[in-house]
Image (cartoon, grey):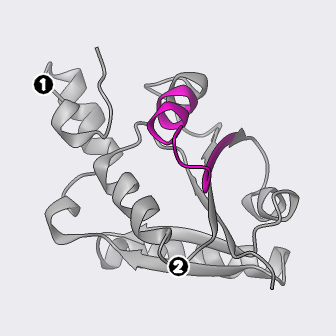
Amino acid sequence: MDKKIALFPGTFDPFTLGHHDIVIRGLKIFDHICVAIGDNPKKNRFFEVDFMKEKIKKLYSEDKKISVISYNKLTAEVAKENKANYILRGLRNTTDFEFENSISQINRDLNKNLETVFLITSPNLAPISSTIIRDVINYGGDINKYLPYKID
């Protein structure tokens, strides 16, 4: 039987408790999850890709069912390169669904073996978004309670 490998793509700027929740819950469905940090040239990052990659790798260093990569190409291609037949995504609300639905359809068109699986964010984590976390940082607030690791 083939392993069920999922790619969990995102900019993860930063990787939040909401993202962590999706990974942990995704492990109940998939044999392996590859957290894939995309470097989107349209977005000005707050945290460097390499910094985030190291934080996430350290977070999951004890779990061999989770790997962490960074990429700068089409997600459908990265999935194929990593033998992933699934894309894992979290949905906080209907706005997320509208956006993610379009992306999933294009990914499937680019890679016919690719299925997108959506998990609904746990209710207590739904208000957390990377954008809001960056705003908290910009105004001097403490973000550590929204992250599964510490930022000094």
Q: Position of residue 105 (x, y in %)?
A: 67, 82
Residue topped by disc 1 = 141
Whether residue 48 sits left or right of residue 144 in the image: it is right
Quadrant the C terminus occupies: top left
Q: Which callout, 2 or 1, points at the residue further toward the start of the chain?
A: 2
Relative vertical location of residue 47 with respect to residue 22 in this rendering, above or below: above
Residue drawn at 38 percent across, 53 percent down: 20
Is residue 66 located in the magenta-colored stretch of the structure? yes
Q: Is residue 129 magenta?
A: no
Q: Is residue 8 above or below residue 64?
A: below
Q: Measuring 32% from the left and 79% from the top, which residue is drawn there? A: 94
| Quadrant in the rendering for residue 81 | bottom right
**Residue that sits furthest to the top in the current view:** 152
Residue name at image x 47 percent, y 75 percent: 28
| Segment colored magenta | 53-69
Q: CA distance from mark 2 to mark 1?
A: 36 Å
- Determine which residue is flagged by label 2: 29
Q: Position of residue 92 (x, y in %)?
A: 30, 69
Tag count in the figure? 2
Residue 125 pos. (x, y %): 21, 60
Q: Nearer the viewer, residue 53 or 2?
A: 2
Secondary structure beneath disc 1? Answer: loop
Give the quadrant of residue 76.
bottom right
The answer to whether one can see residue 35 in this image is no
Q: Is residue 19 left or right of residue 51?
A: left
